[in-house]
Image (tube, grey):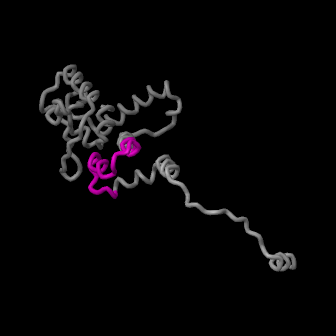
Amino acid sequence: MLTVLYNTGARVSELIGIRVADITLAATASVRLHGKGRKQRTVPLWKETAKEIRQWLKYADLHVEQPLIPNRSGLPMTRTNVAERLNLAVSTATKMCPQLAGRRISPHTWRHTTAMHLLQAGVDLTVIALWLGHESPVTTHGYVEADMGMKERALAAITPPATQHKRYRPTDALLQFLESL
C-alpha cells in the first residue's frame, strides 16, 4: 500500500479505487488511477513496485475485478482503513527513527512527499502536475514555494552582479549637523 502510494502520488480515494484490472505489469508497468471528476490518469510504476505488486497478487490470490488493496472482507479499504494502516507503519518506524515521534503523517503527506521528491529530482512542474492529476500546474506551484533547499541551490548557482561595495562616508557638514542635534 505504502509503495503504491509513494510511487504514484495517489490520493486516498484513488488508492482505494484501484482494481487489479487497473494494473499493467508488462514491460512498462503502470497503474490507471480514477481521480477527481471522473478523470483517469496512468502513472508508471518502478520495476520494484511492479515486482511487489506481482508478489502481492500471487500471495493474496486476487482476481481482475477485486480491489488491489482490499480490507479483511475483500472489499475496498476505506479512508479510515488506510489511515490506520499508515499509523501502524509510522508507529513501527518510530522505534527505529525516533524523530518521527509526534509527527502527524497522513496519506496526503505521502502524496506531498512524492511531489517534492519529483521536484527535487528536477522533474518539470507540468509533468508533476500530470503525475498528481492536478487540473493546472498552478496547483503544483505551491510545492516550489515550499522547498527552501531548491531555492538555496538556485541562489548558489548564480553569482551576484559585480558591484563595488563602498563604505558610506558622510561629509563634515553632515557630521556637524548631526552632532548639533
Indicate left or right for 108 with 155 as reference: left
Q: Is residue 122 above or below residue 159?
A: above
129 falls in the magenta region: yes
Q: Nearer the viewer, residue 60 or 144?
A: 144
Find the magenta span and give its range. 116-138
| Front position in the image: 96 or 85 | 96
Residue 131: quadrant of the picture: top left
What residue is shown at x 16% (from left), y 33% (from top)?
24
Identity of the residue drawn at 27% across and 29% down: 49
Quarter-of-image position of residue 112 = top left
Task: Identify the residue at horizontal 87%, vertical 79% (top origin).
Answer: 180
* Magenta span: chief secondary structure: helix
Q: Where residue 12 sits: x, y (%)?
A: 29, 41
| Image side of residue 169 versus residue 147, left or right | right
Query: Left or right of 126: which side holds 28?
Result: left
* x, y percent for residue 31: 20, 37
Query: Count of labels shown?
Result: 0
- The single residue placed furthest to the left in the displayed view is 64
Quarter of the picture containing the C terminus is bottom right
Residue sitting at x 31%, y 56%? 137
Q: Residue furthest right?
A: 180
Q: Is 124 on the left-hand or right-hand side of 33?
A: right
Q: Residue 30's x, y, as percent?
A: 20, 36
For the residue pair 101 and 147, the one nearer the viewer reads as 147
Which quarter of the rendering shows the N terminus?
top left
x and y percentages locating residue 48 in the rendered image = 28, 27
- Of residue 169 and residue 74, the one placed in the foreground of this image is 169
